[in-house]
Image (tube, helix red, strand yellow):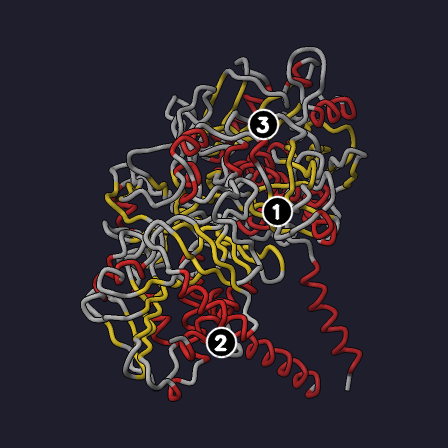
Amino acid sequence: MNIKRASAFLLFLSGLTAVPLLAAEADLKAHIRTLSAIPAVTGSEDRMAVKIREMLSGRLNVETDNLGSIYARSGKGEPGLSVLAPLDEFGWFVSGVTADGYLRLDRAAAPPHALFDSFLMGHAVVISTRSGLQNGVVAQPAMHLLTRERRDELQKGISLDLVYVDVGARSEEEVKDKGIEHLDAVSFRPDLVTLANDLLSGPGLGHKAICAALAMAAEKTAAARTTPAAYFIWMAQSRFNLRGGGARVSLGATRAQMRLKPKTVLLLEILAADRGDGTPSVGKGPVVWEPQEKLSRLRAALEKMAGERGIALQHQTGGESPLLRPFLATESDALILALPVKFNQTPSEVVSLRDVQSLVELVADLGQKGGDL
Amino acid sequence: MKRLAALLLLISSTFFLAQAAPAPAAEPASAWELLRQIVMIPGISGQEGKVIDFIRHHLPSGLRPQGDAKNDIWFTAGEGRPHLLFVAHADELGFTVAEVTSQGTVKLKGRGGFLPQACEARPFVIHTVKGPVEGVMVPRADLYSEAAQPFAPETYELDVGAASDKEALDLGINPGDQVIFKKAIIDLAPGILATRAVDDRAGCAALLAAARDIDWSRIAGRTITFAWSVEEETGLHGARAMTSSLSPDYVFAIDTFVSSDSPLENKRFGFARLGQGAVLRAVDSSNITPRSELRKIFQLAENKGIPVQARSSRGGNDGSVFVAAGAVDIPLSWPGVYAHSFIEKIDKRDLDALSSLIKILAEEFR
């Protein structure tokens, strides 16, 4: 018998399964599902970084800097285009443990809105420890024991002063035995919900979707036969803002700007949608978002490609973006292409798979054009 | 080459068998195992059918379950006095579909029984004739405003992703469908879990486990009824209906003890600690159990080494509707932490103690 041949055949079979997911053009939904299960709180993005690197094939030259940002480069020569997305999401970290075994929380990055912390009460969370994820729930008063006054008070919203995470421990020692340490990241428990019309929902889902979209677009770009040089960057600590100077400026974005000094920058971001105030809508295409409207070369190229592909684009002008600010301060041609997210920055962000797919196609097209826009 | 083909056949057939013929799940026996299954079954007040079916299916053979028009279910063994009734409620908190809007959202009926803001932007499931449909509770419109008003909608609304009423109706959504929180069992530590509807599926499971553990042929000189009621959460309606069929001397309502063993609660009352055993809910909002009866139970429990604590708390119980006709109501419980939330917490040790206590009372209490 040809054991050698059988072994070789089995090796071949096993080799097939080891091909990176994206190289095998696996389903976008599966990618989003994979990333949706991985916490990536600002300052603790390492798990997400590992998973994204696993999704990238050897066709890309991938580096990670000392903050944890991923720089994936396609092609050769001077990069003409840099596409950046946040690697991190808003969340919390363990700031203390009570004598009776409850975790106290703090935040590194400012919350995205005033009621963000209020969603914690009664919610399941995960604690990212060195040895893996630990389950927790945030204590909520029993309905039967609430006085009307206290109930009314709680309805106004809560601060982190009222947040206690229950991990099923009775003492600091038991918490320690679970491998939970100070500074471990805490985020909402992932729970992907499937809605009609190719909509998905879950905590931090907008962010996870653009991370997945960038990974797919980078792979598609790298797989093209003639690939000009382009950078694809997942920025760690992008939700953490630099101090001083008044305006809010993203640390992760500033790092990327100083390292690459890119000429042409496309930032992938999430944008609150369907707020009933003229904001963009989920399912109607990615959003060209400019704090100040200007018809740049990049925007013209993007709109041309969208037109050629039959991809609808939405537009929003105004607002501010700490991600964009470092690039606006230079001569970069910088633009935000945003994923519209309904119920943005709640435990049930809603995104459209079609919008994410459009992002992938547009970014991949741009990547293949490189600096030749 | 034949050997290679045989090897591949073996691999593929093993794979096929693993996919196509999984080993059957072991029949659950312990209260904890039963809880982990029964807690996931949808069954709001008035729509407890699947929960009742589960209970009926897991009853020991030889017992003859009876029911009433409400869909309460019970079985009785033995004869004579005293007549002991043990009752747990099968229903859970939730909503029903009120209407589908022209925009495709789903307006809900009822207040759910939860802290309103705990429902905001959270996932729920509509149980339709076509199967479960997931949706998200629409958050307040001014969520991002610095002056946001409290989340206290007159009518709760779900976004299921449909863009029109036709799309929503095509999903199978109809007025009256039950709507419950999207459940998941959160294992916090070995033997400690948190999820929705521990109230009162833990009681159902403890009672069912005891029913499976008792040698019913040895029940003599007394009458024992085990019952699972409906519509407790909406006003003890199932138990009230049972009063026309059952006239117990003692009723043991098996239901949550609303515990203040939480960092957010005042410990002045309700402080039954998690993991310290079953609870005699001696005083609540619907009943006061005579101290003499409590002492009898403590004695029986002590003899059997079953940890029991007696405490006072809030809330009503099914047993209270039998008191006016002459029964003594002795609610049995476990320390239920975060009651009426989506993360109701329970300790296996307490559930085991409760199930053991039910068994010993059924066998020996007079």
Q: Earlier in the sequence, mark 3 or mark 1?
A: 3
Chain ID, mark 3? A
- Local crowd size for mark 3, using a 10 Å CA cut-off: few (<14), some (14–19), many (≥20): some
CB atoms at circles 2 and 3 under 8 Å apart? no
- Residue at mark 1: A126
Is label 1 in a helix, a strand or a loop? strand
Q: Amino acid at mark 1?
A: Val
| Residue at image coords 49%, 64% | B36
- Local crowd size for mark 2, using a 10 Å CA cut-off: few (<14), some (14–19), many (≥20): some
> Are discs 3 and 1 located on one and the same chain?
yes
Is label 3 in a helix, a strand or a loop? loop
Compared with B362, B122 (above or below) is above
- Local crowd size for mark 1, using a 10 Å CA cut-off: few (<14), some (14–19), many (≥20): many
Q: Nearer the viewer, residue B143 or B205?
A: B205
Mark nearer the viewer, 1 or 2: 2
Q: Position of residue B332 (x, y in %)?
A: 42, 63
- Whether residue A225 is visible to the viewer of this picture, yes or no, is no
Chain ID, mark 2? B
Compared with B320, A271 (above or below) is above
- Residue at mark 2: B29
| Residue at image coords 58%, 59% | B275
Q: Amino acid at mark 2?
A: Ala
- Residue at mark 3: A111
Q: Amino acid at mark 3?
A: Pro
Mark nearer the viewer, 2 or 3: 2
Q: Quadrant of the C terminus of chain A?
A: top right
Is label 2 in a helix, a strand or a loop? loop
